Amino acid sequence: MLRTAICLMAFVLATAALPPGYTLSELTWSFDPFGNGTTVNLTGTVQKVFHELHTISPAFYNKIITTPVPPTNSIERLTGNYTCGPQPGIDGRASKSAIEDGIYYLRQVPGHPWMRSGPRACAQVSCSWNSGIWWCNDNPHFISLIWFKSIAGCAQVLCENCVDNNWIWPSVIGQNFEKGNARVRTQF
């Protein structure tokens, strides 16, 4: 409950810290949790979706959490350009360990993510201990990915290259720009 309250507070704060001119969007996650071809769409962060999956299909949830996660060095890393440090409208450092937790969750999730039309729309993909992973759409149409590992890979690049060890705790802040006018951001 406390973690949910912290994430809600972080969501409200992060909404206020969206880059100028950007709107908040919800990420949609499409799954087949029953294995019968029935697609279920859930919205929200990966942590919220895991909670909902546990409620609607405990067997599917248990399968996800017991499947070994590949080591970090085998994660898909996309080849976009990244920038580190504060950007206009992005000035909150995220806890590196919290972002790594989000990456771990994202590497486990089956299904595919999609987001409504932009341009200039961002959805919070992960929230852990006041630290978020965001996916932004700068297209005039909806975007989708084959899997969540792509978002995890973008965030991993930031964790490896945009670390500030001179903060209270190791922190990360940056953006990873990918092909197709999409990007992944980390921030408080």
Image (cartoon, grey):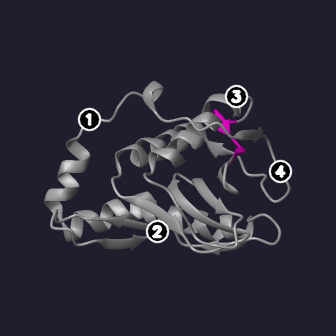
The picture places residue 1, in percent across and down from the top left corner, at 38, 65
Tell me which label, 4 or 3, sits earlier in the chain: 4
The picture places residue 145, in percent across and down from the top left corner, at 49, 56
For residue 119, which quarter of the picture?
Answer: bottom right
Direction top: furthest residue: 73
For residue 159, which quarter of the picture?
Answer: top right
Which one is in front in this view, the residue at disc 4 or the one at disc 3? 4
Q: Which residue is mark 4?
A: 87
Q: Which residue is mark 1?
A: 68
Give the alpha-carbon distance from disc 2 to disc 1, as whole Å: 24 Å
Marks 3 and 1 in Cβ contact (< 8 Å): no
Of helix, strand and loop, which one carries label 2? loop
Residue at image position (65%, 61%) is: 136
Marks 2 and 4 in Cβ contact (< 8 Å): no
Q: Identify the amino acid type marked 1.
A: Pro
Q: Identify the amino acid type marked 2.
A: Gly
Give the alpha-carbon distance from disc 4 to disc 3, as whole Å: 18 Å
Residue at image position (63%, 73%) is: 141
Q: Which residue is mark 2?
A: 44
Give the alpha-carbon distance from disc 3 to disc 1, as whole Å: 30 Å
Circle 2 packing at 10 Å, graded few (<14), some (14-19), many (20+), is: some
**Viewed as shown, does residue 82 lie left or right of 135?**
right
Of helix, strand and loop, which one carries label 1? loop
Q: Which residue is mark 3?
A: 165
Marks 4 and 3 in Cβ contact (< 8 Å): no
Observer-nearest of 95 and 152: 152
Q: Identify the amino acid type marked 4.
A: Gln
Of helix, strand and loop, which one carries label 4? loop
Q: Magenta region: which residues?
A: 168-177
Give the alpha-carbon distance from disc 2 to disc 4, as whole Å: 25 Å
